[in-house]
Image (tube, rainbow, N blue to C red):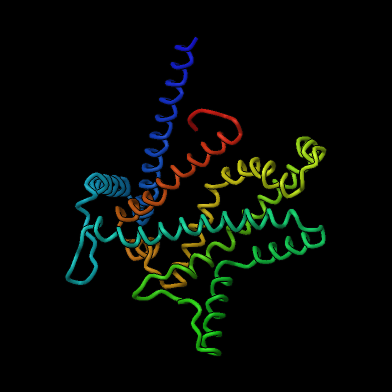
Amino acid sequence: MQRFKTGRLATNFAIGIFKIIAEIALTIFLTSFIIIFAKSYFFLFTPQWFDVFLNNYKRLLTHLIHFTEIRIRISQFKAQSLTEVIIEPYSYTSILIICILVLSIVVGVLLSLFTILLPEKLKKVVHQLAFFLESIPDVVLIFSIQLGIIWIFKKSAVLLVNPIGGPQDVYLLPIIVTSILPAIMLFQITIISLEEEKDKAYVDFAYSKGLSTAWIIVIHIFRNVCVTVFSKIQFLLWFIISNLLITEYLFNMRGLFSFIYRNLHSSEVLVICLLMIFLPLYFLDHVGKWITNRLSGERGLV
């Protein structure tokens, strides 16, 4: 019986690994296909379209295999290896994404725990405020905050934070601004889960034992709500990335998305940059699913 269980676990693990490899390979293929198709679009209705597409695709695959040999022109007379040039913008954007994710989760969860303990009238006020902030477009929100900081500086000569990028990388304001909408989204998801959990039988049983509302929510209900939080990690990350794309442009930041924009003409650079975004998020998504399964009492490879 023990051998049977061990064999089944090994089989499930092997299937899971094969599934991960297949999904990554499919992603690389589709990403490359879409980019090369876009590059060959002008030849679409001509006899030589297939030859152009095939040659471009072969060239791209060759560059991907030998990616260390790709050169990026950084000035009219100077070129550097892609692996050297991309480290700084990729590290910068990665730090921003991690900080924004952590701040969004902390603020969203703490705000939901605080709101659930409020009286009903105050809850409605918080919900209306969250709905109002979420309805503001990303560009308008970021631009308004930048103008507000500049206005304060003009009136008081006090520069709270650097409102735009320059020779030095900016962190504080982009992290705060970009985390606002993801935090509100997570707050609304979490508060709905908390309300649903409050109506379950185990909560009534905890009340019957004389436990306080705060204790029940933080200790008992919150553990189950964590399942919902971690199950939304992938969606939250893509939401952060879409916001950060706008933030980098408006703050004149030298991150990965600005690097991609400057090198849109290079198919191989575009594919490599997109994969550098996708692969870490893909593994983070699997970690989130694994944590979700652990919290919900399930086991096995996601």
Q: Is residue 24 found left or right of 68 in the rendered image? A: right
Above or below residue 200? Residue 148 is below
| Residue found 69% across the figure and 43% down from its top | 221
In the image, farthest residue toward the top: 1
Q: Nearer the viewer, residue 42 or 189?
A: 189
| Residue found 46% across the figure and 21% down from its top | 9
Q: Residue 149: x, y in percent?
A: 53, 80
Q: Residue 190: x, y in percent?
A: 66, 50
Q: Is residue 293 found left or right of 248 in the rendered image? A: right
Q: Can residue 263 be seen in this view?
A: yes
Q: Nearer the viewer, residue 206 or 234?
A: 206
Q: Nearer the viewer, residue 37 or 227?
A: 227
Above or below residue 107? Residue 205 is above
In the image, farthest residue toward the left: 77
Above or below residue 161? Residue 237 is above
Q: Quadrant of residue 227?
A: top right
Q: Quadrant of residue 254?
A: bottom left
| Residue found 19% across the figure and 64% down from its top | 79
| Residue found 45% across the figure and 17% down from its top | 6
Q: Quadrant of residue 293?
A: top right
